[in-house]
Amino acid sequence: MPSAAKQLRYRLEWLAITSIAKIIPLLPRRIMLTMADALGKLGYLFDGRGRETALANVRCAISEGSLPYNDPEELVQKSYQYFARSMCELFWASRLNEENYSRVIQVDIEDREAYEHATKNGAIWVTPHYGNFEWISLMMGYRNHPFTLVAQDFKNELLTTVFSQQRQLSGHKVISSRRAMIRLLKVLRSGKHVAFLTDLNVKPDNAATPIRCFSFLTCVTGLHAFLHQRTDAKIMPGIAIPCSDGTYLMKMFSPIDIPSDCTTAEIAQRCWDIFEPHIMAFPEPWLWMYKHWRYLPSKNADNYPSYSKRSRKFDLLLKPPQ
């Protein structure tokens, strides 16, 4: 049970977010975008912990030659602004529907035949925390392909409810990431769709898998790989790329090519390898302020961020299967 002080803080957070959720849809889009950029700059200035994490991530990626960028501070500030924009646009999305979403979202389908097959038979739809990752999901609902979405719960349960309501605007169903596997298997076996973000760092347990991200080893969910192995459902990657005019290009890629003998780690790596070139070419919209590389491997651990820590479980996860 949270303390009285924490309950008060949670209530104030809820009041602030619900107020924003009511105000933002009233704003013209241009004003909303200007406000989001201002909020992003404020976040960069006042979120010292997140800013230092982001700068550490960017500098490490630059030092490895994985990121051709000269000004880490500029990149991080823009990352805050793009994240603030995606959050504001999540609430502004109540003004979108199946008839008008195409005014702000362009859709580029790489393999239309494979896309049509996936939408008819059910698939695993994945995206990273990049650009407007919220809208790429909503857009699929407006195209009459509702998902069961997996989302991490907020510590403040009141906020979980607010954000879930917004994410369900186009017909999706949001479920908690806790004990989601069985529910997702049932959804896929019924010929429907599941979706989640694949680039958040998770604890090195049975549901996790290591991948190499910007030359560094990290520990991410292996849920998409597990679901594919159990159902043979296609893994359909997509990414929301911001355009200079304030709209988005939603790129829907071909399904991941997965040979039958692929391991969970190999499937997860193939998925990430679709996204990384796009993030490298236009890095600002990625969520750089997140601790992507929490775990320090026992070998070849040079140039990892200072927040990275040794983990025996992570080392075990890195060992090849016997």
Image (cartoon, rainbow, N blue to C red):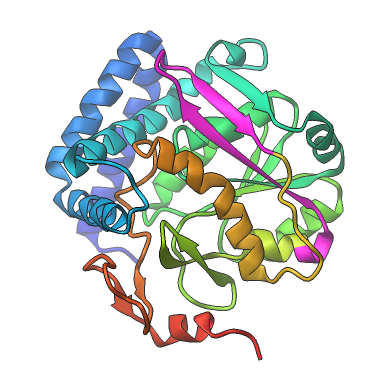
Q: What percent of the width, then of the height, locates residue 135?
A: 53, 30
Residue under the point 18% across and 54% down: 52
Q: Nearer the viewer, residue 319 or 191?
A: 319
Provide the residue span drawn in magenta: 229-253
Q: What percent of the width, then of the height, locates residue 95?
A: 52, 15
Quadrant in which the C terminus appears: bottom right
Q: Nearer the viewer, residue 131 or 152?
A: 131
Query: Which quadrant of the figure has residue 83?
Result: top left
Total labels drawn = 0
Residue under the point 35% across and 10% down: 30
Residue under the point 72% across and 59% down: 183
Above or below 316: residue 292: above
Residue under the point 29% across and 50% down: 289
Above or below 140: residue 56: below
Q: Is residue 232 magenta?
A: yes
Q: What percent of the width, then of the height, locates residue 266?
A: 64, 66
Q: Is residue 27 shown to the viewer in this render?
A: no
Q: What percent of the width, then of the height, locates residue 177?
A: 56, 59
Q: Is residue 140 magenta?
A: no
In the visual, does 220 lie left or right of 120?
Answer: left
Residue farthest along the bottom direction in this orientation: 322
Quadrant in which the N terminus appears: bottom left
Q: Nearer the viewer, residue 17 or 86?
A: 86
Q: Is residue 148 shown to the viewer in this render?
A: yes
In the visual, does 83 lie left or right of 274?
Answer: left
